[in-house]
Amino acid sequence: MKPTRPLAAALAEETLVLDGGLSNQLRDQGCDLSDALWSARLLADAPEQVEAAHAAYVRAGARVLITSSYQATYEGFAQRGIGREEASGLLRRSVDLARAAAQGTEHPVWVAASVGPYGAMLADGSEYRGRYGLSVAELERFHRPRIETLAAAEPDVLALETVPDTDEARTLLRAVDGCGVPVWLSYSIEGERTRAGQSLAEAFALAAGNDQVVAVGVNCCRPEDVDRAVEVAARQTGKPVVVYPNSGEEWDATARGWRGDGTFDAARVRGWQARGARLVGGCCRVGPEQIAGLAADVGVRE
């Protein structure tokens, strides 16, 4: 069901459950994500798989779906020989697929159009470092066209997510200004700092007083790092907080696999809520089973 009220209005009254990691669900469905475009490749090659992944999270109790546009960029598509007009259609499709997955539900499901960092397009891990050596103007030229196309597809919110540093956050907030769609701003962090090393207080302060920003928070981080980040985000901005950490496992780049034990625990959400979290979900390696547990703990299951 398409929501009849803005996301900001809903957050003033309740906690909403986000989906989990799209890539791990697509892999579980048998999809090959080894391409540099990652899940964005499937927008062209297997859109039905993307819709099915979204639908799995809706069944698990997710009330907010994040689109498959994280790594979908004009530059990345061009490297695959996809022209600008076709690329625009694929970006719009990412929003349409999430909407389609929510059709027929008895409860409203909001769609968040993912706007990943510049480093995601490079597909070399630099989105976890930031500081790309580009000027603010160069970064804005990269982000603005994609933002404009996604905004025109009428999502409920733009998810400025996995942002590694305040330089890119500042650029993204400039690029979304005037697009007509509310946004949330979510950093990728390590401990109590952004991936580039800035303090969380400095990072979240960028969104304070910006009425277009409906929530601030963190994603693609360890669950253990969320507790403190929620406190800082709420204190610095007075806004609802969005959190969707990874499973807690660690990626071994040499072995090309995950190692360690998962520490994502749906029961932790009560602590996050007490600190100000109003959008809660998961990122890498968090699947429908964990989201179902989280939804049950929050009490939003039908």
Image (spheres, grey):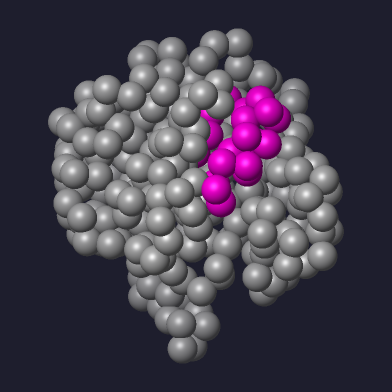
Q: Is residue 240 visible?
A: yes
Give me the residue at 39% from left, 27% from top.
Answer: 213
The answer to whether residue 88 is left or right of residue 39 is right
Q: Is residue 275 above or below residue 247?
A: above
Res 221 → quadrant: bottom left
Give me the residue at 25% from left, 28% from top.
Answer: 208
Res 34 → quadrant: bottom right
Res 99 → quadrant: top right
- Chief secondary structure of the magenta span? helix
Q: Is residue 130 above or below residue 227?
A: below
The answer to whether residue 57 is left or right of residue 267 is right
The mark total stands at: 0
Q: Is residue 277 visible?
A: no
Quadrant for the C terminus in the image: top right
Q: Is residue 35 or residue 109 the one in the foreground?
A: 35
The answer to whether residue 235 is left or right of residue 267 is left
Rendered location of residue 225, percent (x, y) = 24, 54
Q: Judge whether residue 94 is colored magenta.
A: no
Rendered location of residue 161, percent (x, y) = 45, 46
Give me the residue at 54% from left, 11% from top.
Answer: 5
Rendered location of residue 83, percent (x, y) = 82, 55
The answer to whether residue 207 is left or right of residue 135 is left
Q: Judge whether residue 153 is colored magenta.
A: yes
- Which residues are the magenta region? 141-159
Rendered location of residue 154, percent (x, y) = 66, 25
Give me the residue at 35% from left, 63% from top.
Answer: 131
Quadrant for the N terminus in the image: top right
